[in-house]
Image (cartoon, rainbow, N blue to C red):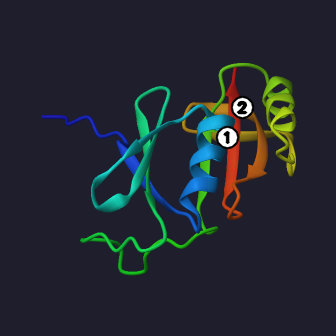
Amino acid sequence: MTHVVRLDHVVIAVSDYERSNAFYRDVLGAEVVELEYGRYGYRLPGGQQLNVHGPGATPHPRAADPVRPGNSDLCLVWEGTPEDAAAHLQAHGVEVELGPVPRTGAQGGGMSVYFRDPDGSLLELIVYG
């Protein structure tokens, strides 16, 4: 029997909930949801979620070496052109660090634009097709 395995959520860490909530809501279109223990989650279009560990959060269980603010590296699919992605980021005052550049993701070849969240985590928007 084959079981379908797919990502449901991943955990990122932030140093300031208010600043990061605004960034992920305004720049990436996430729905900010309050989780147990005063934590947050960022629900992204397409059924994925980023759970957020922030100031004072000590959820159990957690990784042996818990994620820290600024040390995540995430790729998200952008529905549009790479140029639209770059323009969207720039309209929100977010600096494009690299791109558009060719990259390979879960669906094969695409074009990516790289930028950082307020804590310095590297984020990538990839466009397929």
- Type of amino acid under label 2: Gly
- In this picture, residue 75 sits left or right of residue 88: left
Closer to the camera, 75 or 128?
Answer: 75
x, y percent for residue 52: 45, 57
x, y percent for residue 120: 71, 63
Q: Which residue extends farthest left?
A: 1
* Quarter containing the C terminus: top right
Please tell me the numbered disc located at residue 110. Answer: 2
Q: CA distance from mark 2 to mark 1?
A: 6 Å
Q: Earlier in the sequence, mark 2 or mark 1?
A: 1
Q: Element at badge 2?
A: strand
- In this picture, residue 81 sits left or right of residue 98: left
- To which residue does mark 1 refer? 104
- In this picture, residue 72 sits left or right of residue 111: left
Please state the total of marks drawn on the protein image: 2
**Looking at the image, which residue is at 66% across and 28% down?**
78
x, y percent for residue 114: 78, 47
